[in-house]
Structure formats: C-alpha cells, structure tokens
Image (spheres, rainbow, N blue to C red):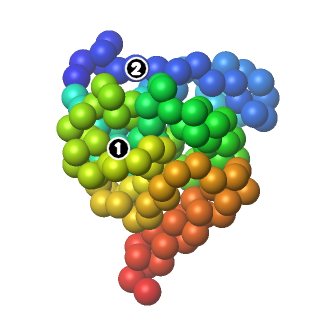
Amino acid sequence: MASTDVETNVVECPNCGRRNRVPTVADGVPQCGNCRTALPWIGVAGDDNFAEVVDRSSIPVVVDLWATWCGPCRMVSPALEQVARDLAGRIKLVKVDVDKAPAIAERFDVQAIPTLLVMKNGQVVATQLGAVPAHMLRAWVEEALAEVARSSSGT
C-alpha cells in the first residue's frame, strides 16, 4: 500500500490541544507532534487491509466487529472510543463492519455482534460478546492487557 493510500484520522492532543494526523497503519505509537503525548489510535479495517492494520500492529489491538444496523453496537462504540482515549499509547482500536468484511467475520466465526477481540501479533488474547457497560469494557481491556504483559514476560 503506497503511503498516499494509508487512511489517516485527525486527532486532537488531550494534553496541548494540537491537531495531529494519525495514520491507520504505522510503526510504534502515535504521538503529538508538539508535546509528544501518546494519542488515541482509532481506525477502520476491512477484508483488504486487516492484516496490515491489526495483525502487524506493534501494540495490542481492540477489534470491534460490528454492523451499522446493530443498536447495541452503536451503544458500545462511544465507550470503546473512550477506552481508546484513556489507554492512548497502550492500545489501538480498530472497527470492522462485518457486513463490509465477510472474510473477517468468517475468520473469527462471528455469530453475534458486537463481538470484541483483543489481539496481539495476530492472535486473539480475549473475546467479549455483546454490549457491556463502559466500566466493564474498560476492566475487560485492562485484564487483556495484563494477560499480554504476562505472556510477553514468559510468566
């Protein structure tokens, strides 16, 4: 994928307020160009770029498998985005519309939506089916991050 083909989002730095372009695919962790604060990393993936966006990410990825017509999916989305902001620099949030990405839905045998995954190095670390309250979502992501850290340290 040429650099001109990489999707970017504009994100306001929570520390200094500067607006930054954050690419969906990049090495490392996005940081503010002004103050170097870690920025929330939120992107979209589909069948054509999932491996590049998710499987090759340098940090754990929360994958939101959802659909536009799904009420619970729309309810959980703001909570997921808040978790991504709260855990900026530690996770990447990637939304996948299962209606537009049937191969991804098949890969993960999606039977219900929303289906949430935490992935590291292309492997599923944790799965959450259905919508849950924001505080439970945050706890679930943090437990998955702890599991990633334990498995990385070999304990």
In the image, 29: left or right of 19?
A: left
Q: Secondary structure at mark 2?
A: loop
Name which residue type carries label 2. Answer: Glu
In the image, 106: left or right of 65?
A: left
Front-lying residue, 22 or 69 = 69
Give the residue drawn at x 43%, y 54%: 117
The answer to whether 10 is drawn above or below residue 90 in the figure is: above
Q: Which residue is mark 1?
A: 54
Q: Which residue is mark 2?
A: 7
- Whether residue 57 can be seen here: no
Give the residue drawn at x 45%, y 37%: 66
Which corner quadrant of the image does residue 10 belong to?
top right
Where residue 131 appears, x then y in whole percent? 58, 49
Give the residue drawn at x 78%, y 35%: 15
Where residue 107 appears, x then y in whole percent? 22, 48
In the image, 37: left or right of 122?
A: right
**Please, which residue is most extreme toward the right here?**
16
- Whether residue 116 can be seen here: yes
Q: Secondary structure at mark 1?
A: helix
Distance from Cα at disc 1 to Cα at disc 2: 14 Å
* Label at residue 18: none
Classify the position of the C terminus by image quarter.
bottom left
Where residue 24 appears, x then y in whole percent? 42, 30
